[in-house]
Amino acid sequence: MDSLNGFSTPHHWLLAAIVFMAIEILPPATHFAFLCLALGALAGAIGAAFTPIVWVPWVAFVIVSVVLLPVLVPLAKFLFAREEPPTTNG
């Protein structure tokens, strides 16, 4: 578990959240996949800020990311779906 100890400060988690948000903003569209990871990293930062236990931020990151992925990715595909104009016989 000592190998994870270097990435257990809130600063590292916030940096990870910023990197994930930057990847989400850059093209091509990732349909909120990296947004889920960024929010998970924010949860990890909160976990790291309130406890010295190394595994707590990792569990928060995984749980938040896994819960948000099946919710936000289909939502993004619905919101950003291109509608084709209706064809007419005229």
Image (cartoon, rainbow, N blue to C red):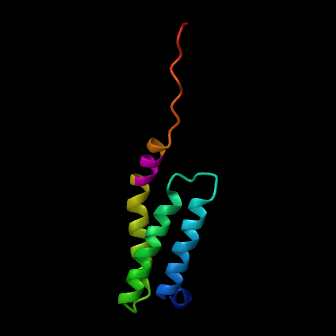
- 57 over 78 or under it: above or below: below
Measured as percent of width and height from the top left, residue 17 is found at 51, 73
Determine whether, in the image, residue 10 is placed left or right of residue 67. Answer: right
Measured as percent of width and height from the top left, residue 49 is found at 40, 88
Measured as percent of width and height from the top left, residue 32 is found at 49, 56
Instruction: Kindly indicate the quadrant of the structure image that contains residue 23.
Output: bottom right
Q: Answer whether residue 10 is magenta in the image.
A: no
Residue 56 in view, yes or no: no
- Depth check: give the residue in front, 55 or 39: 39
Q: Main secondary structure of the magenta part?
A: helix
Residue 17 in view, yes or no: yes
Determine whether, in the image, residue 74 is placed left or right of residue 24. Answer: left
Residue at position x 56%, y 88% in the image: 3
Q: Residue furthest left?
A: 50
Q: Residue furthest front?
A: 90
- 50 over 36 or under it: above or below: below
How many dots with numbers? 0
Measured as percent of width and height from the top left, residue 38 is found at 49, 68
> Magenta region: which residues?
72-76
